[in-house]
Structures are given as structure tokens and as C-alpha cells.
Image (cartoon, grey):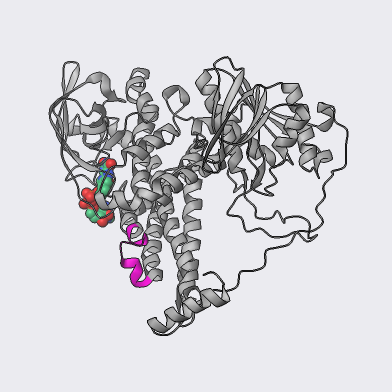
Amino acid sequence: MRFTLTDEQQMIQAMAREFAESEIRPIAAEIDREARFPHETVKRMAELGLLGIIVPEAWGGSGGDTVSYVVALEEIARACASHAVVMAVNNSLYCWPVLTYGTDEQKERFLTPFAAGHQLGCFALTEPQAGSDATNQHTLAVRDGDAYVLNGKKQFVSTGREASAALVFCQTDVAKGSHGISAFLVEKSAPGLSVSKTEDKLGIRASDTAELVFEDCRVPAAQRLGEEGQGFRIALSTLDGGRIGIAAQAVGIARAAYERSIAYARERTSFGVPIGQHQMVQWMLADMATTIDGARLLTQRAAALKDAGAPHGAAAAMAKLFAAETAMKVTTDAIQVHGGYGYIKEYDVERYFRDAKITQIYEGTSQIQKLVIARHVLGERA
Amino acid sequence: MKILVAIKQVPDTATQMKLGADGKTIDPTGITWIVSPYDEFAVEEALRIKEKRGQGEVVAVSLGPDRVKEALRSCLAMGCDRAIHLNDPAWGAADTLMTARALAAVVKQEAPQLVLCGRQAIDDDMGALPAQLGELLGWPSAYWIMEEAVDADGKTVRVARQVEGGLEVFDLPLPAIVTAQKGLNEPRYPTLKGIMGAKKKELKDVKAADVGLAAEAPQLSITALEALPPRPPGRIIQGDLPTAVKELVRSLREDAKAI
Ligand SMILES: Cc1cc2nc3c(=O)[nH]c(=O)nc-3n(C[C@H](O)[C@H](O)[C@H](O)COP(=O)(O)OP(=O)(O)OC[C@H]3O[C@@H](n4cnc5c(N)ncnc54)[C@H](O)[C@@H]3O)c2cc1C
């Protein structure tokens, strides 16, 4: 068993770290405050090849592996969780399914410019009544000649406003339930598709979360991804990979909070000693260090399994669950280590705390991860 | 146009230096090694010259032990076409002159039109090598360059050098040696594709005998290294504000002799 990254993975990690430190970190507080999408730095991420890491060069990507993706994503998330979600959505929730299930014609149009980061993609599964219960799809796609006509509403779509295309899940055969769900690649400019609102959020405020409304939106049948009825399988396999990315995001947020806590514990004094000398503060720091390491190992293991072509659904769910819970606990304790100052916006730990929360919710809540893990350990397939 | 960039691998600026047990070397444990920042400016400039001309070759070269391959690989990831690693125990104790001799031998073999270096390496800050290399080759050289323009024919290079209060502009006939000062450019990050592609590029190991050099003893040897004396602790002046200010001014004037 080896625990070292390859030379390339280390170089990618170093590049992502330097880039994030010098170009993303300085604007992170400001774009959070203004809830402003960071177009300039997202463009820089595209130039560096961070938006299509696992996509082969032939399809506009960087030809890297999933381990490289998670080490880079951790670095980006450490500087800014909003940038990390933009990166995660484009890489795992959009490019990966198009690469895996798309035809060559679909890849040319819906993958190459997206993997290169010239355009951004998004993933529209959730509906008002279909979150954890994602099979409860009400958006309908009705076949009409060589097209489908889409009607319905998708909500909480990350990058939904900024994206140029959406991977949309719809019911094509209501009678078949989850086996009647199909996936479609829809250009955001398609007539009948509109962004009806973007949400005002607790965290990841620089990433837009949009509601998409489909009103008699005609989508050519050639833009159906995979077979009719294959949509839910596509969604689940996509989320298996996506969760590894969210785990990496959670590790990055937790690490940022931990590093701030260590620095603060060295410099802040109370009762005549640095607070890091108080045993109760040490406990918090030791727990942070231990759980972050555990979360990272689970995350990188899940990524390595995916790279090896091995089953990784349970490993991804465990990584996401543990990393998200770790991020929430670590950022909570980071505020505690900072005392009152941690509660003030001037100190970044306040932002880390708000950003961490989403990792327990999207791409399956922590409860849903436990459900997935339980099904695996009991030998029931999800 | 062929450009050779000489780079050095140095400890990261954030590294806490510790002296080795012999008192003459740095303890290498825990050091993160990087390409010396001024050398990164040189690499960047070489790549820009090539990109501007639409053709050419950029060769990175470095002398040092096995770990130096990492630094050369970063240069390849940034976009250099190939790399040469001067890697021979005979160069184990190389001083700047030995290094310059080895580089001069490579330059003679490679025959580039331009050699770029950083103005100095940030480890020992000697800054002697480019001048020694120029002298050994008999090439014109210019140091601490802030701007550079190779003419369309690739016959001369116009360089602007930082001097007190302004820039000093020279034309040098090529081949020449130019060293980079901070401000020349903003080095690029290697892209993911660049990193993935670096492994496929040539990284050649060269021994002293390969460039026709016999073993020689260094002219310079280090007698001792000493750590900086620890900084005296800061002093917090207590008391009410008017008294404290008076004491501060007195202390700055009489103790620190700063005002
Ligand atoms: C900022 C943000 C970005 C998002 N981005 C996207 C995106 O890009 N694309 C997309 O499709 N969706 C996205 N989502 C949606 C997200 O995935 C869902 O919000 C999430 O899956 C939970 O669904 P829900 O909100 O409907 O909550 P519900 O499903 O209503 O859950 C409410 C509570 O009940 C619990 N619960 C529900 N069912 C069970 C059960 N069976 N057992 C135990 N507990 C249960 C949940 O864990 C939760 O605690 C995003 C959401 C947010 C807030």
C-alpha cells in the first residue's frame, strides 16, 4: 500500500495551491459578501485546465485522473468554497456523464468547449418535491417527432444561471417510475427555458443557485443522453463520482479552518500563555487534525478506486459523509478556538462555517449517504 | 531560435533553515525544493520569446543531485521543450566557477542563441555564475533585466536594465547571456496539460565526461555556516498613554537609536 501522490499529482497539487493562494484567496471574502460570481478567476481555472481534469485532451480536457482532481479541488476549496463548487459541478456533474454516456456528436458540442472551460455546464435533477426523493420527478419530456417537449421546474441548480448548458432529468414514461426517467442536454438559450430566480444563501454565496423553468421547451431527440429510461442510472452513477468531489471540497474547507485555528492558538494568549497551551484547546486541534486526515484518506481512496475502474459508490458515500461531518465540526470548533473574534466576519472562519454546511446537504444529505452505505453493507443494491 | 535557460533548485522561501551537524552545510530534512524565483522569470521570458516568434526551442538546464529532476520537470511543465540535468558526483561540491564551466561546456554543445538565467539564486545569493559563464564563453552579457526584445532576425537583443531611478538600455549581439530581474514578467503556472505532458518530454542526464570535463577541485570551499542570532523579544511598554508614549520616544532615541 502506498500513500504518496505521483510526481504529476504533486505538481498539480502545487499548481492549484499556488494559484488558489495568490489569485482566489484574496477575493474570497469579497465575492462572498457581494454574492458575486467570480468570472475572471473561473476563466483562469479554465486556462489552467482545472475545469475538465479527467476528460481526455481529445475532448478538450486535461487528461488527468480522479486523484489529481480531488487534490486540486481540495486546494481550491481551501481558498474559496464557491470556486470549488463551480469546479466540482463542471467536472463531475456535467463533463463526466457527457464523457461517459455521450455520443461523439454530443461530445463535440456538449463536452469539448465545457471541458476546456470556455463554457460551463450544470446538473438539474432536484425539483421542489424531488430532493432526497430524487425519483419523484415531475418534469415531463414528451416525445414529439424528432424532439421532446419539456415542461416543469428544476430548482437549486448550481451554476444554473451562469451555465451555457444543463443536464436535465425528466420523466419520459410516468408509468415506469424511476425507470421512466431520461437525461437531456439542453442549451440554456433554448426557447422555452428560463432562469426564474437565483437563491440568496447562507454559504457558497459566490456560486449561483438557480431555478430553471421549462415551458414547452423543444429539445431534439439527438440531445437525449443515453437511452430512454436510463436517466436515473446516469444520475446515480454521476453522483457516485460527484460525491468524491464534494468530499474533497469539505476537506479543503476544514483544512482552511484548521490552519487558521493552529495559527490563532499560537498567537492568542489568555491567562499568560498561548491558548494552544490549554488542554481543552489542544483537544479541539487534535480532533481537527485527526478527522481531516481521515476525511482526506477516505476521499483519496474513493478517487483511487474510481481511477482503477473499481466499484466506488459506497467508498464515495463514506468519504462524502465523513468529510462533510468533519467540515461542519471543524469549522464550528474553529470559531470556538477564535472565541468572539471567530464570530466576526473579519475573520475567515465565520465564512468557512457557513460554507461547510452545504457539504452535508447537496449531492445527497448526510442521512442519504448513510442510507446508501447501509444498503451497501446489507448487500442491497441501491 | 534556440534558448537555453539555466536554473537552480533552491529551498522554498518558507523553509525554516537548520544547520547540518558538520556546521558547513544545511540540514536537508524537511526542505521543500523549488525553482529559484528569479530563474522562473528567465523560464517565462524564454517561453514568451518562443511564443512571440512562433517557433524555437527552449532548453532548461541545471546542475545538482537527483532531486534537481523535480525542478527541471516543473520547467518542462511550464512549457520548456526539453531539459538537461548535469548530474555527476564529480560536481558534488561544485562552486560557481565549476558550475559555470559545466554550463559553458553544455552551451558549446547546444549552441543556443540566447542564455537566460535568474539574476541570482535565492539560496546563497552569489549571483556570480552568469558573469563567469559570459567570461568563459566570451559572450556579451547583461544583468538584472526588466525588459527585453529580440530583433526580428534574431541577431541582437535590446535589453533594459534596472539602475537607480530609471532604465539603462543596451543592444547586445547574439549569442548573449541575459539575467532576469523581478518585474520582467509574471511567470505562468504550469497547466494541467503541461504537467501531464512533462513526463513525455526529454530529460537527459549528463555526466562530466559527456561534456569533456575532467574532475577538478572547487576553488571555493565553505569553512563554516552560522545561524543568525535569535531576534531579541519585543517589548510592550505598559502604563497610561502619555507616559507610555514618552517612554517609547525615549527608548527609540536612546536604546534603539532609531530616531
Ligand atoms: C446550494 C445548493 C446547491 C444545490 N445544487 C444542486 C445541483 O446543482 N443540482 C441538483 O440537482 N440539486 C442541487 N441541490 C439540491 C440538493 O441536492 C438537495 O437540496 C438535497 O438533495 C436535499 O433535498 P431537499 O432539499 O429536497 O431536502 P429533503 O429531501 O426534503 O430532505 C429534508 C430532510 O429530510 C431528510 N430525509 C429525506 N429523506 C430521508 C430518508 N429517506 N431518510 C432519512 N432522512 C431523510 C434529509 O436528510 C433532510 O434532512 C442544491 C441544493 C443547494 C441548497
> Which residue lies at the image location 32% right of the left edge and 21% below the top edge?
A109
Q: Does the magenta segment cover residue A347? A: yes
Residue B132, image x, y percentages: 75, 36
Say which of B24 and B220 sits in front.
Answer: B220
Say which of A20 and A370 sits in front: A20
Q: Position of residue B168 (x, y in %)?
A: 56, 34
User: Which residue lies at the image location 28% right of the left edge and 53% below the top edge?
Assistant: A203
Q: Is residue A6 visible?
A: no
Q: Main secondary structure of the magenta part?
A: helix
> Looking at the rendering, in which quadrant would you find the C terminus of chain A?
top left
Q: Residue at x 20, y 44 (%)?
A: A130
Q: Does residue A122 sit above or below A247 in this rendering?
A: above
**What span is colored magenta in the figure?**
A339-351
Residue nearest the viewer, comparing A222 with A33: A33
Q: Position of residue B46 (x, y in %)?
A: 58, 28
Query: Splitting the image into 4 quarters, where does residue A52 fall?
Result: top left
- At horizontal 29% and vertical 35% (from top left) the residue drawn is A122
Asked if the magenta segment contains residue A284, the reply would be no
Front residue of A331 and A181: A331
**Is residue B178 in view from this perspective?**
yes
**On the rendered structure, is A120 left or right of B110?**
left
In the displayed structure image, the side of residue A229 where residue A293 appears, left or right:
right
